[in-house]
Amino acid sequence: MAVSTSSSKHQLLILALALALVAGLFLLPKVIVKPKDGQPTLAQNGATANRDQGAATPAVGELDEHGHPAGSHDEPSGPTAEQPHMTMPAAQRREISTLVAKYTATDDMGSKLSVARELAEKYKAVERFDSAGYYLEQIALVRPGEQAFQRAADQYYEAYSFATTEARQKLLGAKCRELYERVLKNNPDNLDAKTNLGMAYMASENPVKGISLLREVLAADPRNEKAMYNLGLLAVQSNQYDKAAERFKELTEINPKNVNAQFYLGVSLAQTGAKQEARKAFLAAKSISSDPSLAASVDEQLQKLQ
């Protein structure tokens, strides 16, 4: 299973900018409104959140314990739609604000679901992944199922992968765990959901459970690239470079075209002192990717090997 392109590029960019081996990788917003009279419902305000942009400031005011704007489901009016999108082009900002207002105003369930889908796509397009997840979650609460909850969880996971503060990681990680647990309740054999759930546990009080989940995935599918890759990254983060090199070497044998595996194999080997093997891995990564950020990272690492 391949690692997602957006997350992969983001991980390499973080390495290039930080010039360090701290990959806070694969490292979401809504309070569930209880339905009245046993009927499903969508949240009535268009609460929005913002992809973490390197600052601890949330999209609208403060985030509550669920990763949502504080009070967004307690006050009838909720927050305004304008503030989260000040960095967007004006036309997109107006378009989303109009949709949020429409979502808030309509009481027709079919119309509300339709607007929620459109909002999710608009937010995804501007990389407000937690806001996209929010609206997809609203849909899943009305029409639950494995795929519906996974669509929401995956968008929150994208936001989690961009989180650059510990507080943000914890908030979004908790949301990931909540939704991926729902996915696995529908289908315990969903290995992609289990892998992401495992990584989301790394921002919890029980990271050992995350490791266990990743190992469960490999036990079920020994060639699972995503689980193997993540275990390698976690070994890098904990300075266990020998173990990391083993993981990434195995992964590159399974898929020689996995550019991130080749790159981090080079990183791990360099840290163990195996400079020639590291150089070979770095050059392999560079040869199979046209990403300039990767090329810059490789060139920097090669300089360090001289």
Image (cartoon, grey):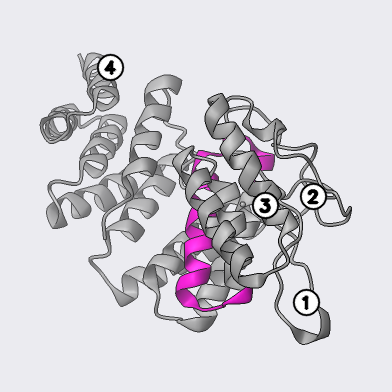
Residue 225 percent location from the top left of the image = 27, 58
**Residue count near mark 2 (Cα–Cα under 10 Å), binned few <14, some 14–19, many ≥20:** some
Circle 4 or circle 2, nearest the eye: 2
The residue lying at 17 percent from left, 49 percent from top is 252
Residue tagged by mark 2? 64
Q: Is residue 67 magenta?
A: no
Q: Nearer the N terminus, badge 3 or badge 2?
A: 2
Q: At 58% from the left edge and 48% from the top edge, which residue is drawn?
A: 130
The image shows residue 78 at horizontal and vertical percentages of 82, 48
Q: Residues within 10 Å of mark 4 (few under 14, many from 20)?
A: few
List the residue tagged with mark 4. Answer: 300
Q: Is residue 119 left or right of residue 170?
A: left
Residue 35 is tagged as 1
Nearer the observer: mark 1 or 3; the answer is 3
State how far apart marks 4 and 2 are (Cα): 41 Å
Work out whether mark 1 precedes mark 3 in sequence or the reverse, and give the earlier one.
Answer: 1
Q: Secondary structure at mark 4?
A: helix
Helix, strand or loop at label 3? It is helix
Residue occupied by mark 3: 102
Q: Nearer the viewer, residue 97 or 28?
A: 97
Q: Measure the alpha-carbon separation of dots 3 and 2.
A: 25 Å
In what quadrant of the picture does the N terminus appear?
Answer: bottom left
- Give the CA distance from mark 2 to mark 1: 20 Å
Q: Residue furthest bottom?
A: 38
Q: Earlier in the sequence, mark 4 or mark 3?
A: 3
Q: Measure how far apart labels 4 and 1 are at the Cα level.
A: 55 Å
Spatial separation of the CA atoms under disc 4 and disc 3: 50 Å
